[in-house]
């Protein structure tokens, strides 16, 4: 007997389909962005916002 034989547990098990395979290039682009951001930070190219309004103004520009 497995836990799936129990009717209470069977109701909790998701019947969702598995997601489609992701594009391997997507992960590569993400990692490249992280690397570039870390390089910028290491070279001192970053802003410190005092509040949410300053951060929003920086992101909008």
Image (spheres, grey):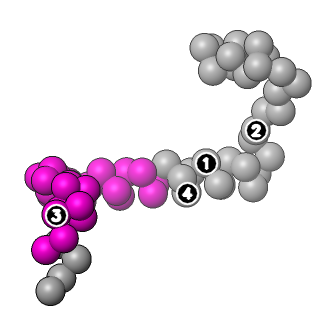
Are the residues at dot 2 and dot 4 in contact (C-beta closer than 8 Å)? no
Task: Give the crowd class for mark 3: few <14, some 14-19, many >=20 residues within 10 Å.
Answer: few
Q: Quick one: 27 or 9, which is closer to the camera?
A: 9
Q: Earlier in the sequence, mark 2 or mark 4?
A: 4
Task: Give the crowd class for mark 2: few <14, some 14-19, many >=20 residues within 10 Å.
Answer: few
Are the residues at dot 1 and dot 3 in contact (C-beta closer than 8 Å)? no
- Quadrant (top left, top right, bottom left, bottom right) of the N terminus: bottom left
Write down the residue under mark 4. 35
Write down the residue under mark 1. 37
Write down the residue under mark 3. 7
Q: Is residue 20 magenta?
A: yes
Res 20 visible: no
Are the residues at dot 1 and dot 4 in contact (C-beta closer than 8 Å)? yes
Mark closer to the observer (3, 2): 3
- Quadrant (top left, top right, bottom left, bottom right) of the C terminus: top right
Secondary structure found at label 2: loop
Q: Quick one: 19 or 48, which is closer to the camera?
A: 19
Q: Which residues are magenta?
A: 5-32
| In the image, residue 30 above or below residue 46 | below
Residue 18 % position (x, y): 14, 56
Q: CA separation, marks 1 and 4? A: 5 Å
Write down the residue under mark 2. 46
Residue 54 % position (x, y): 78, 17
Q: Quadrant of residue 13?
A: bottom left
Secondary structure found at label 1: helix
Q: CA separation, marks 3 and 2? A: 55 Å
Res 46 visible: yes
Residue at x 45%, y 57% (from the top left corner):
31
Locate residue 48 relative to residue 12 in the image: left or right. Answer: right
Task: Give the crowd class for mark 1: few <14, some 14-19, many >=20 residues within 10 Å.
Answer: some
């Amino acid at each position: 007997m497995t836990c799936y034989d129990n009717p209470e547990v069977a109701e909790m098990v998701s019947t969702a389909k598995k997601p489609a395979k992701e594009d391997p290039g997507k992960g590569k682009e993400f990692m490249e962005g992280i690397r570039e951001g870390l390089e910028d930070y290491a070279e001192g190219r970053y802003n410190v916002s005092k509040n949410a309004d300053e951060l929003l103004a920086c992101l909008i520009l």
